[in-house]
Image (cartoon, helix red, strand yellow):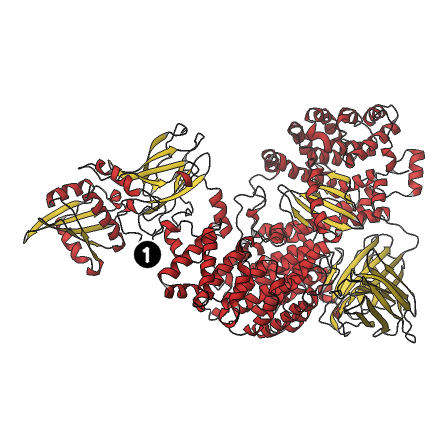
Amino acid sequence: MTDSKYFTTTKKGEIFELKAELNSDKKEKKKEAVKKVIASMTVGKDVSALFPDVVNCMQTDNLELKKLVYLYLMNYAKSQPDMAIMAVNTFVKDCEDPNPLIRALAVRTMGCIRVDKITEYLCEPLRKCLKDEDPYVRKTAAVCVAKLHDINAQLASMLIAESHPNSNLLDLNPQTINKLLTALNECTEWGQIFILDCLANYTPRDDRESQSICERVTPRLSHANSAVVLSAVKVLMKFMEMLPKDLDYYGTLLKKLAPPLVTLLSAEPELQYVALRNINLIVQRRPEILKHEMKVFFVKYNDPIYVKLEKLDIMIRLASQANIAQVLAELKEYATEVDVDFVRKAVRAIGRCAIKVEQSAERCVSTLLDLIQTKVNYVVQEAIVVIKDIFRKYPNKYESVIATLCENLDSLDEPEARAAMIWIVGEYAERIDNADELLESFLEGFHDESTQVQLQLLTAIVKLFLKKPTETQELVQQVLSLATQDSDNPDLRDRGYIYWRLLSTDPVAAKEVVLAEKPLISEETDLIEPTLLEELICHIGTLASVYHKPPSAFVEGSRGVQHKRLPGSAGSGESVESPDTGSAPVASEAPPAVIPSQDLLGDLLNLDLTPTTTTGPPPPSSAMQMGAMDLLGGGLDSLMTAGFGAPPTAGPPSFTAPVSGGLDDLFDLGGGVGMPMGAYVPPKTLWLPAMKAKGLEISGTFGRRAGVVQMEMTLTNKAMSVMTDFAIQFNRNSFGLAPAGPLQVLTPVSPNQSIEAVLPLNTVGPVMKMEPLNNLQVAVKNNIDVFYFSCQYPISMLFVEDGKMERQVFLATWKDIPNENESKFQLNDCHLNADAASSKLQGSNIFTIAKRTVEGQDMLYQSMKLTNGIWVLAELRAQAGNPNYTVSLRCRAPEVSQCVFQSYEAVLKN
Amino acid sequence: MIHSLFLINYTGDIFLEKHWKSVINRSVCDYFFEAKEKALEPENVPPILQTPHHYLINIYRGKLFFLAVIQTEVPPLFVIEFLHKVADTLQDYFGDCSEGVIKDNLVTVYEILEEMLDNGFPLATESNVLQEMIRPPTILRSVVNTLTGGSNVGDTLPTGQLSNIPWRRAGVKYTNNEAYFDVIEEIDAILDKSGSTVFAEIQGVIEACVRLTGMPDLTLSFMNPRLLDDVSFHPCVRFKRWESERVLSFIPPDGNFTLMTYHVSSQNLVAIPVYVKQNISFMETGSCGRLDITIGPKQTMGKTVEGLLVTIHMPKAVLSANLTATQGNYTYDLATKVLVWDVGKLNPQKLPNLRGSLSVQSGAPKPEENPSLNIDMKIQQLAISGLKVNRLDMYGEKYKPFKGVKYLTRAGKFQVRT
């Protein structure tokens, strides 16, 4: 008699038959029928159609039948909420049954039915059961409150408040911690996991409390359940940070941590995997714990592949001069295994050992050469990739092996290996007699190569040319034309153009750039960034620790999760008298405000464009200045407009806005609009071209009208669809400019329509010095996307109305500011006389305080004040008949002078 | 917490699903099937998979996948441990944890699963407690149930649930009171070509079978407890007494349980009971290879090595083996390329030897990889680490129990590289 019999069906239809049986009078038959229903449910058949019939069987004194019906209810109640209500009465009745088992069962099942309507009825019986005479029922009811919290937190806290008025149950303080630690010894293994995880969130007040918690948690390291062990490790790893390193107990604790970690590795492979991922973190944070346990990470040939790969990673992390011989012998052994992925990683590991342990480099190289001799294709390719890194780490040491490498040129078919080989040939072109032939052979199939190889080939041939210019002119021309003319890849084209220009304008500079000494590569590759590592250490044993990502990066519904950090060690931060600075823990040295890079990216993508918050990240535009530095990075988009060497602040602000094309025309068009007496408002310039912003074109300008700084924009829709939902946000900038209200674009902008928008600004936003000073990075959002651009504002719009200084004060201040803070500028082609200039400048809040005429020269003494309170004093010399003015500016913050002068120029010339 | 459980067989059919919260469509398993496809071997399926809305954590046991679906951040070890506990429990209940057995007891399995987790949190996972609530099926009981209409669901409260010792039920009665302990040690070792030890360690476990009336309080002491520096205990063991006196003091669960596991680390010297002389070579040209293996005793402490079995995973190109064994039989499975030599008892006077030729697919290149030898064996009445039980005392009860200790050493992952 087995349950398989429940699956023999008749032709009439299963559901029909079951229905009849469920409604049978015979108890036995009913029970059998419900069993059949449950059996169908467990294999995934939909038997929800039987809901009313099954619920009818609920009122029974047969416990087994009742349990079965409850099982059914839990599964289907959610999909049949109206029917589920039918069961409520029975539940309420069962909660008063004389048998405690039934009472408990009823309250437990009710809690599992996540139907709102039922929740309402749940409270009363639950309240009763919480006061039940039987402890088992009370326990079940208490658990049910937790379930209720899931469904309806408000109801649950109401229930809790009834029994614990004014207590915050989740507040971690020394008293609750003490209770938790006591409970730790008395609860089941599963409860221990949760208690330990909870303890890990607590931050002890001092090192003594920290030690006492550690002492009480340590016995958990000997638990048979590996999850308990790992959670205990987490608590200890975190609280250890607070212990002074010279404490005896600290050393004891370190010793106690190793054996349980090793033991985890003899468990089932799935457990091993999680343990290894966590050990990987622990080893990076505290390598001393496992430094003598290298051997347990040796790979067994029947380990699952996911365990093998993790073990290999840890072996490299633990490799040191003391054990390198053993490690190498093992790695060599692995390189002859069957599994390709594993072999590759093993070969790569040999290279990493060479880079990490200098003394072993020679042996590693010879091991790699042995492996190359095997001629196994993928082994050779991996070996060449790592030998490239070894060359970079130890220049001029192992180049004798190049000949061997060249022998295997033909067998390389993977891009990474080909690129590595080409790099080697290019880098050591002067030592390889037939370097040009080798590279030429690669060039034949240039267009079939992957980008990686193409880029590398381009660079290698340029290197070769710079080293042997006479013989390889033809080759370099060939590759440059291939890269610039026949390629669709912008990276490749740009790099080609850069080389071309470099080579044609200044070969010496080209040599300096292309053959520059390369920075040494770091010892440890793929180390986890320290702040992230700290966070992950706080999350040992969780999914975060398995994925090596912060929980906020992937766990659903955890937005705004608090970033956990390791506590700093007591007594090292503030103790001035402590002489042993060598023991200061890393944790306290790390700057506290560093945000992990992942978050920046996350914020950028989820950028909330409300005008009130102004802490946006720097928009990734205005790449001009940075781009010029990035010659070899290949990331330059618009080489043609870059204008090498032109200082970015040469013209007035509106001229240097980083947009290409007919700026000057635009300027000319708007030239006559400037108001003679009011504040100077530069003409609108194109900020965001339509092709860069999916059809949205923005041009605009800044002005100061009635004491309010404004951003005036024309938004033009050049796309085919309507644009709505505009919003704007600024990045931090030099003067704290920020929108004073939301961007008022009330109507949707239909295609080909332009709309004028005026955005009042204030200067209370966050401040960050920009380069140039008056640069402003803006993000604009609409229903299509978020766009970034940067523009420059005339500093004159920041000159406030009360910028007129008293004469005496002016004189004293002028003398007071040191001479080196004075900047002199020449203002050419200005055909205004001194008085006209003075009145024109006054319109822009540049006030003339005094005027002197010396030897036919008019001297105007002027003052202005910026919104942030910086005063700028000026002396303007104008000679009648000479269109050239001299402006001398004195200011305590001399970096603004350049911008101020630009404003002079802009105001006076319009 | 644990949201749902799917049981999946070797071929990829879902044959049981249990949901502790709302029902999750079984299509979520498609991600798992994809990974299974990619992994080729079922052992190589990654244990933790990320899908857009769920995490899938699986274990592979006895040709079955236990796949848990979770939705929130949960300690993965907790889930894996729990899945193993489920497998252990089913094993306990039905004597076997296979697809057939589970299908025959679907409803019972479903009831057990419901008791083990409540709303995704573990509730009753101790075998002792579970068996009180849901009685394991026995032939006698199923006959009685059919005749009388009885059920396999207990109608009284399980006693262990609320006590301080949840692992033991109250009111246990036996006519024969007995307590047996098996000290079982497994040697994990890797020996290299020349026979020297690359790595060796001992995994020990003490399995107990205790059938004692009432609430006995036991104390087990060792002759040489200093060997044990890395131990994990059953929750019943009082850790404080172990720390201070190095004795195991505990109130035992009823029936079979694992009292402790221990690990004798690779830093201690581990005795290797056998040596293997081997030579497996393939000719550079021509399609043949040679194999010659001899096994002899090394450090057996005067005991006999039994159940000796050598398994070799041959390179793919090896077509057949033509060998002669001086002792035992060998088989070569063409499909899996596994050579198994069942030696049996090791006779120190006449060392077993297996030699002969291997034929390799003609034209195939010389195999690159070196096959490893896997050795199985056992030695009765010996704990290779030297661990010895000193005495067992019982307090709290008046009767005199029958006591016994057995020792066994066997090979765990014992590999010889060639």
- Image quarter of the C terminus of chain A: top left
- Image quarter of the N terminus of chain A: top right
* Residue at image point 64% right, 42% down: B54
Task: Say above or below: A466 vs A873.
Answer: below
- Tell me: A294 left or right of B158: left
- Tell me: A716 left or right of A877: right
Residue farthest toward the left in the current orientation of the protein: A855
Nearer to me, A375 or A331: A375
Reading the image, the residue beneath label 1 is A645
> Is residue A575 visible to us here?
no
> Is residue A230 visible to us here?
yes
Residue A503 location, quadrant? bottom left
Q: Position of residue B39 (x, y in %)?
A: 71, 51
Nearer to me, B256 or A166: B256
Q: Position of residue B100 (x, y in %)?
A: 85, 43
Residue A226 location, quadrant? bottom right
Residue B68 location, quadrant? top right
Task: Say above or below: B136 vs B381.
Answer: above
